[in-house]
Image: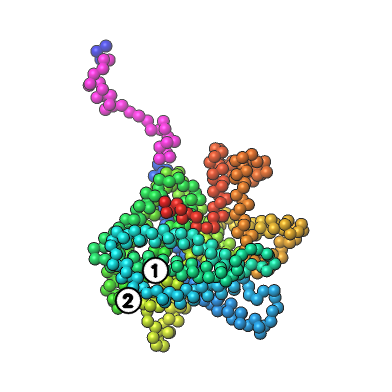
Amino acid sequence: CLSLSPSLLRFMCAELTRGYFLEHNEAKYTERRERVYTCMRIPRELERLMIFGIFLCLDAFLYVFTLLPLRTLLAFLRLLTIPCCGLGGSRFLQPAQVCDLLKGLIMVLCYSMMHYVDYAMMYHLIRGQSVIKLYIIYNMLEVADRLFSSFGQDILDALYWTATEPKSRKTAHIGVIPHFFMAVFYVFLHAILIMVQASTLNVAFNSHNKSLLTIMMSNNFVEIKGSVFKKFEKNNLFQMSNSDIKERFTNYVLLLIVCLRNMEQFSWNSDHLWVLLPDVFMVIMSEVAVDIVKHAFITKFNDITADVYSEYKASLAFELVSSRQQNAYTDYSDSVARRMGFIPLPLAVLLIRVVMSSVKIQGALSSVCLLLFYLGLITMKVLNSIVILGKSCHYVKEANMEGKLFERPTAQTSKQTPKKANPAKSPPPSVQRPSTSITKQPSPRAKPFPPAPPPVTEVTSDPPPDSPPKPEESSSETPQSTELKHRTTKKDLLEIDRFTICGNRIG
């Protein structure tokens, strides 16, 4: 009895010798280990997506400098030769040529308007402000840039569709000229906003104690607080990833502008470049670190695997490959703009303005160097397009999405033919004429709306109509809620065509 009586010695012996078995809760600890492995895989998978997306943005950005001027010149020559060649067809110009002329005219007008904006005066005006005021200004500029990006592509799309809409369709619009002036005004304002943002970053680089640069870099870590503790689905994470790709590429161009302006002030002394590189490297690495930490904890808290970034990469690749087909309804640069919110026109106008003011072209040798530089840009654009197109085809094959490249046009034509006529032989003419694929622009744009009702009808009371295609997806998971969630994300992943994450990233 004495041996069984409680005592301090027996309690200490029990605490030192008691054991437990982790295998009794194997599922819990296995899940915890998988979460650790997922966090370890996030940097590699995220950076793969980022690199692929940055090259997509680079391709769309180089397109403005290389192929767009040539396409605009060809369209202009076609416009001049119309009186000589006569009007053989129903259109003066093809829809793609009209869009090229509009883009070129917007670039020329905005570049001429940017000459009236003094970059040096703006720089000294910003430099005279206090550090706290500049910090607030930079945050306001970031918010304004996201708002401009979310609405700018809609303005440009409205202009393109109003200018190329068939005459037979009687739709209410304000006309091509008002839409054109709206687009010019938007591109000019967005270019000025990015110029102020670049000037603020330049002031931060040139400050003596680097306090402003440190505050601006620490602002990136505030983004973690605003994003990590929110509920995210796959679609929301996809939009955030696209936004991060656009933001990182824009920061690279802003850093290039800052380096050009500083090198001009120091008479292109190479020694000053080595002074700038540590700060540039520090800004880039802080952005990379913030993105990795943010995505790692978002995937951890929302139970999202690292394989989702491969799906995002396949979705971007699918957009690129589908825009290269003959029956494509948009240009690939516009598809990148809609998907990521990256609009290259304002950034290109600002970069041309900075380069032309920083580099003086005088004499025949400078003109030859400029021509060689342009040919080098064209070569870089072509090589980049070939590489990312090959990678995109590889990603599409890995994701088994090849069939959707051919299903989407047939599904659209089959949906359109009952409205016009009952014969089933109407789709072949739309495939034979490449020009009609662009005139039917609203039909692919209206396609994301019909697939939206099926998830809603499944939840309410209509499983029988959609029951044939659903069991294949529902057989993989037993819970009804998770089954419905994954089903809707797979459908909606390819149908997000706008920069809708703006509100989430501002909060």
Q: Is residue 474 above or below residue 493?
A: above
At 28% from the left and 67% from the top, the residue drawn is 128
Label drawn at residue 264: 2
Q: Main secondary structure of the magenta part?
A: helix
Q: Can residue 10 be found in the magenta stretch?
A: yes
Location of residue 36 by image quarter: top left
Q: Quadrant of the N terminus?
A: top left
Residue extending farthest left: 9
- State the image coordinates of residue 84 (x, y, percent, origin top left): 66, 85
At 43% from the left and 40% from the top, the residue drawn is 31
At 49% from the left and 74% from the top, the residue drawn is 107
Task: Please report the bounds of the magenta region as a residue range.
Answer: 4-32
At 37% from the left and 49% from the top, the residue drawn is 225
Q: Which residue is mark 1?
A: 195
For residue 176, say whether it is visible: yes
Secondary structure at numbered mark 2: helix
